[in-house]
Amino acid sequence: MSATRPLAHFVLDAAEGRARAGRLVVPHGTMETPAFMPVGTQGTVKGVSPEELTEAGASMILANTYHLYLRPGADVVTELGGLHDFMRWKGPILTDSGGFQVFSLAAIRDIGDDGVTFRSHIDGSSHHFTPERVIDIQRALGADVIMAFDECAPAGVTRQDAARASRRTLAWLRRCRDRFEATEDGAPARQALFPVLQGTVDDDLRTSHLEQVLELGDWPGFGIGGLSVGERKDDMWRTIELLDSLIPADRPRYLMGVGYPDDLLEAIARGCDMFDCVAPTRNARHGTAWTAAEGQINLKGARFRLDRDPIDPECDCHACSRYDRAYIRHLLVAGERFGHRLVSIHNLRFLLRLASEARLRIRRGTFSMWVRGWLDRYRAARAPQTPTQSSTG
């Protein structure tokens, strides 16, 4: 895997405790870390244009192999110039393997050592994903960073089931690596392959899995999978701290499916660099917004009917600089999509600003003091805490 390293080169610039600030350099640009990556599941971040994403501060976005394979098809994306041209996004793109989406279809899929047979959620048609097929699809899509195919074991499974999923993920990683290297010369884009680390919240499984992954190659970065899937928060933090002590310090750590404000900061404090989640736009479609002083608020509430304040007085996003809560509440209650767009833009900017502030604090050496104060303030707000959520949907 040494040939992949120049395609996704990570530079670690500063650290305070476990928290890190760096840069991930890929063919379509540089992303400063820690960073949140908005999720464009089907080739678009729901309701938000590429220009608005750039204005909000996004530098790298995520798209989904499973969804783009089903519609419009990887061949169509290739014919239209690859994912960057297709989406009109000039910056870096990461595609996940589709593994989580496939495994979440528990009632309509069958897992075997060769791969996964599943039925489309769109029309019920049958499809088969193998590690090789997943690499071929991501090669055709042309993202800068692509992910190996993995089996994500849900929280609460037996140790035997978790160990089986980890073994299968490792076997599939070997096949992904071999296919990736075999297709290097004919690939339409220069790409980097990240493995996905599994093992639930079992320390021994996590350690053993990572050790075997390291034996398979000189990987340019690592995806941390199998977390934010229903486990207890303290188990998630303990597992991340364990992996922080084991993953090479000069490689980026991508914590998959984490994107609530407090979870983001807790994970940054434990050495994670990259994040994605649909929560900003999913919450927005229900009228839920994040604020620094009031925590999570639902803008459909009657108390905002005459509120002339912006969503968050501390925010500089398009929505907060031009519109007030009363108007946005009206749009949401009336079912106007513009309201969903405005809250989506705000939530995305909120997370992107939070990651940017974390980078600045790490570089200044003031992160530890700042993050504890920020979290105390956020958690003391009136809104209840939200459980960890996955990045899909």
Image (tube, rainbow, N blue to C red):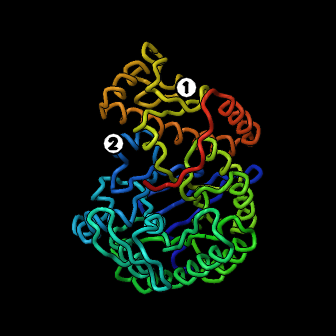
Distance (Cα) linking label 2 and label 1: 23 Å
* Residue 358 can be seen, yes or no: yes
Residue 12 vs 99, above or below: the answer is: above
Name the amino acid type tagged 1: Glu
Left or right? Give the position of 76 relative to 67.
Answer: left
Foreground: 309 or 321? 309
Foreground: 1 or 389? 389
**Label 1 belongs to which residue?**
314
Residue at image location 69% in from the left, 64% down from the top: 201
**Label 2 belongs to which residue?**
47
> Could you tell me residue 49's position as x and y percent?
33, 43
Q: What element carries label 1?
A: loop
Say the numbered circle drawn on residue 229. Answer: none
Residue at image location 31% in from the left, 26% down from the top: 334
Query: Badge 2: few (under 14), some or many (20 or more) residues near its Cα, within 10 Å?
Result: some
Name the amino acid type tagged 2: Gly
> Could you tell me residue 150's position as x and y percent?
52, 73
Q: Is mark 2 on a helix, strand or loop?
A: loop
Residue 283 vs 82, above or below: the answer is: above
* Residue 98 can be seen, yes or no: no
Query: Which image quarter holds the C terminus?
Result: bottom left
> Could you tell me residue 365's position as x and y percent?
74, 43
Residue at image location 33% in from the left, 74% down from the top: 188
